[in-house]
C-alpha cells in the first residue's frame, strides 16, 4: 500500500491507493501536532470540540442511554428475556453466591468454557450492590453508550486535527452528525434489546485500544488490551482487527499493530486448544464446513481460513447471499469507512466470518450484538475518509463536496429507512409478553421453590435463572434432563420473545398436565405453570 506524504494540509496528487493512507506527523509550526486522516496515528491531537457541539453530542447520547435503561427495565419487568439472558444471569447469580466455578446447566459445561467470558467474575460483585440480574442489562446499556461516546471523542479529534483545512461549517458540525448517527443507529438498540451479551463490553475496550493506538501519545492504552481479552474470546478476534488497522495505517502504528494482531491470534488459538472458543469449544463445521470439505471431528479457525483461500467460488456465492444484510449494518457506519485502515480491520474480522456463515445465524439484524462492535470503527473511518477528501485542493474540494452532498442526499434517506423500519418494531419484538402475562409469571416466580428444577419456554426463561437447574424448551420434541425431585414447567404458547406455536408449547402444556399429571400453580393470561414430582429413576422428559 502506498502511503500519503507526511504533513498537515493539502497533499499533492500521488499514486492511487487501495486503502486510504494518511499523514502521520505535522510540521513543527503546525498548531496541531498530527493530522487525523484516514490512516493517521495521532500524536498531540487537539482535544474536544466547540462547547455547543460537545453539549449537543453529549445530550443526544444521554437521551439514548436514558431510553435504553427504561427499555431494559420494562423488558425485565415483562419477563421478556430468553435463553441467552438465562445463561448469563445463572452464572452471575452463582458466582455472587460463592460458586466460583459455576456450570451452565443449559449447555452442560463450566461457564468459563462459554467463550472464556471471565469478566463475569468481577461483574458478579455487583450482585452484592443490586441483587437483581437486571444489573446485567443496565451494564450492557452503559457499555454501548460509553463506546459511542469514545467513538464520538475519537471522531471529534479526527476533525480537530484537520480543522485548518476544512470549511468552517464542516469542521464545526460534523461531530454533531456523528453523534446523531450513533444515537439513532437501530443496531445499537437491537444490541441492547436482545438479552445480555459480552460483545458490547468487549467492543468498548476494543475501541479504547483502537483510539489509543491511533493517538500514540503514550503507552497507557496497552492497559485496555487485557481488559478486551478478559471480556470474551471475541476480544482476541477484535484485537486482530485493531492490529490489522494499525498495520495498514502506516509505519508509526505498524509495529504495535502487528503485536496486537499476534496477541489476538495467540489468544484465540489458546482458547481453541482449551475448548473455550464458542460454547465448549464447538466445531465450526456447521457454519463453515462447506469450505473444508468432508471432515471428522473439530473444525477450528485455521482450517476455515485455509478453506476460504482455496474455495473462492464458494466464498463468492456466500458473500452474495449475505451481502445485503451486511450492507444494512454498514449504512449505520457510513459505509465508506471500510476503505479507511481504521475501519477496514474490524470490518474484516467481524463481517468476514458473518458473510461466510452458511447457516445465517451470525448475520441477522435481530442478532445485531454480533455485528455492532464493528460499527464504531466504520463510523470513525468514514469521518477520516470525508475529511481526507475535503482537504484536497480547492477545485477538487468543490467536486468532492458536491459528491459528498450527493452521497449524503442518498445515504441519509437510506439510513433513515433502516431506523424507521427497525426502531418502532423493538417493542413488538422484544417486549412480547403483555402485562397480564407478566403478572402471572411474577406470581409463578414467587411460588417456585428455590431448590426446584425449572423448565421454561424459550421466550420467558431468562427471569428464572437464579437457580442451579434451569432448562429452556427450544423446540418441539425436546428431551430435557430431570435432575431434581421437583420440576416446575413454565410454559406459554402465546407469550414470550420469539415464542409461539412454532415451539409446540400448547401441546407441551397438555402433555405435562394430562400425561405427567402435574399440578397447576398458575394458569392464566396465556401462562401455565405446572409442578411435577418425577417418578424415581426418571432422568429426562421429552416434551412434544
Image (cartoon, helix red, strand yellow):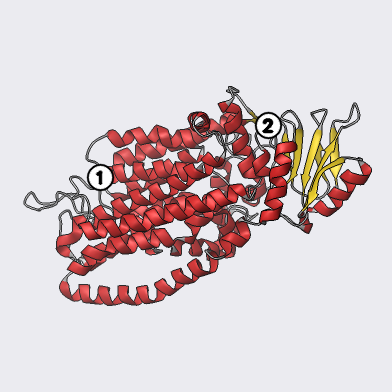
Residue 523 on image: x %, y %: 81, 49
Residue 33 on image: x %, y %: 14, 49
Rendered view: 476 above or below 539: below
Foreground disc of the pair 1, 2:
2
Q: Nearer the viewer, residue 417 or 2?
A: 417
Tell me the quarter of the picture where residue 296 sits. top right
Name the residue located 61 percent from the left edge and 50 percent from the top edge. 291
Residue 158 visible (yes or no) = yes
Q: Nearer the viewer, residue 468 or 265?
A: 468
Name the residue located 93 percent from the left edge and 45 percent from the top edge. 514
Name the residue located 76 percent from the left edge and 33 percent from the top edge. 453
Residue 347 visible (yes or no) = no
Mark 1 / mark 2, whichever is N-terminal: 1
Q: Which residue is the extreme one toward the left?
A: 29
Residue 217 located left or right of residue 320 = left
Disc number for residue 143: none
Q: How many marks?
A: 2
Rendered view: 341 above or below 103: below
- Circle 1/circle 2 CB separation < 8 Å: no
Cα gap from disc 1 to disc 2, whole angstroms: 46 Å
For disc 2, the marked residue is 467
For disc 1, the marked residue is 215
Q: Nearer the viewer, residue 530 or 330?
A: 530
Tell me the quarter of the picture where residue 262 sits. top left
Q: Nearer the viewer, residue 514 or 218?
A: 514
Residue 482 on image: x %, y %: 81, 32
Q: Secondary structure at mark 1?
A: helix
Amino acid at each position: 500500500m502506498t502511503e500519503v506524504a507526511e504533513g498537515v494540509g493539502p497533499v499533492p496528487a500521488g499514486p492511487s491507493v487501495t486503502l486510504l493512507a494518511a499523514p502521520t506527523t505535522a510540521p513543527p509550526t503546525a498548531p496541531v501536532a498530527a493530522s487525523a486522516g484516514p490512516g493517521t496515528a495521532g500524536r498531540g491531537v487537539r482535544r474536544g470540540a466547540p462547547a455547543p457541539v460537545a453539549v449537543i453530542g453529549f445530550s443526544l447520547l444521554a437521551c439514548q442511554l436514558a431510553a435504553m435503561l427504561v427499555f431494559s427495565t420494562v423488558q425485565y419487568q415483562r419477563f421478556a428475556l430468553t435463553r441467552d439472558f438465562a445463561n448469563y444471569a445463572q452464572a452471575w447469580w452463582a458466582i455472587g453466591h460463592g460458586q466460583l466455578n459455576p456450570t451452565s446447566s443449559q449447555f452442560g459445561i463450566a461457564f468459563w468454557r462459554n467463550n472464556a467470558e471471565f469478566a463475569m467474575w468481577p461483574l458478579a460483585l455487583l450482585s452484592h450492590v443490586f441483587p437483581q440480574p437486571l444489573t446485567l442489562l443496565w451494564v450492557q446499556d452503559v457499555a454501548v453508550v460509553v463506546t459511542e461516546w469514545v467513538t464520538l471523542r475519537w471522531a471529534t479529534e479526527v476533525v480537530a486535527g484537520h480543522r485548518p483545512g476544512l470549511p468552517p461549517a464542516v469542521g464545526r458540525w460534523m461531530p454533531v452528525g456523528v453523534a446523531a448517527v450513533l444515537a439513532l443507529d437501530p443496531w445499537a438498540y437491537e444490541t441492547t434489546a436482545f438479552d445480555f451479551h459480552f460483545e458490547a463490553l468487549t467492543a468498548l475496550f476494543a475501541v479504547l485500544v483502537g483510539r489509543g493506538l491511533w493517538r500514540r501519545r503514550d503507552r497507557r492504552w496497552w492497559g485496555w488490551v487485557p481488559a478486551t481479552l478478559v471480556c470474551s474470546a471475541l476480544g482476541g478476534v477484535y484485537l486482530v482487527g485493531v492490529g490489522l488497522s494499525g498495520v495498514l495505517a502506516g509505519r508509526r502504528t505498524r509495529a504495535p499493530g502487528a503485536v496486537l494482531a499476534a496477541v489476538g491470534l495467540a489468544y484465540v488459538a489458546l482458547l481453541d486448544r482449551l475448548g473455550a472458543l464458542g460454547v465448549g469449544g464447538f466445531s465450526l463445521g456447521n457454519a463453515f464446513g462447506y469450505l473444508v470439505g468432508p471432515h471428522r471431528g473439530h473444525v477450528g479457525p485455521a482450517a476455515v481460513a485455509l478453506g476460504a483461500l482455496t474455495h473462492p467460488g464458494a466464498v463468492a456465492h456466500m458473500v452474495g447471499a449475505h451481502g445485503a444484510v451486511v450492507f444494512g449494518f454498514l449504512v449505520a457506519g457510513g459505509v465508506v469507512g471500510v476503505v479507511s485502515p481504521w475501519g477496514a480491520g474490524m470490518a474484516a474480522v467481524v463481517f468476514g466470518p458473518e458473510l461466510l456463515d452458511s447457516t445465517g445465524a451470525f448475520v441477522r439484524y435481530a442478532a445485531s450484538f454480533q455485528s455492532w462492535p464493528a460499527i464504531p470503527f466504520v463510523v470513525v473511518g468514514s469521518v477520516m475518509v470525508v475529511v481526507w477528501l475535503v482537504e484536497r485542493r480547492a477545485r477538487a474540494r468543490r467536486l468532492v463536496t458536491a459528491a459528498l452532498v450527493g452521497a449524503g442526499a442518498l445515504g441519509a434517506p437510506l439510513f433513515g429507512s433502516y431506523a424507521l423500519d427497525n426502531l418502532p418494531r423493538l417493542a413488538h419484538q422484544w417486549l412480547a409478553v403483555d402485562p397480564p402475562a407478566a403478572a402471572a409469571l411474577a406470581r409463578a416466580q414467587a411460588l417456585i421453590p428455590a431448590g426446584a428444577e425449572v423448565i421454561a419456554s424459550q421466550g420467558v426463561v431468562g427471569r428464572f435463572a437464579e437457580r442451579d437447574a434451569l432448562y429452556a424448551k427450544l423446540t418441539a420434541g425436546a428431551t430435557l434432563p430431570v435432575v431434581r425431585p421437583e420440576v416446575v414447567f413454565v410454559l406459554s404458547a402465546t407469550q414470550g420473545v420469539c415464542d409461539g406455536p412454532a415451539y409446540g408449547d400448547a401441546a407441551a402444556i397438555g402433555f405435562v398436565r394430562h400425561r405427567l399429571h402435574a399440578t397447576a400453580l398458575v394458569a392464566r393470561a396465556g401462562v401455565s405453570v405446572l409442578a411435577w414430582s418425577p417418578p424415581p429413576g426418571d432422568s429426562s422428559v421429552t416434551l412434544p
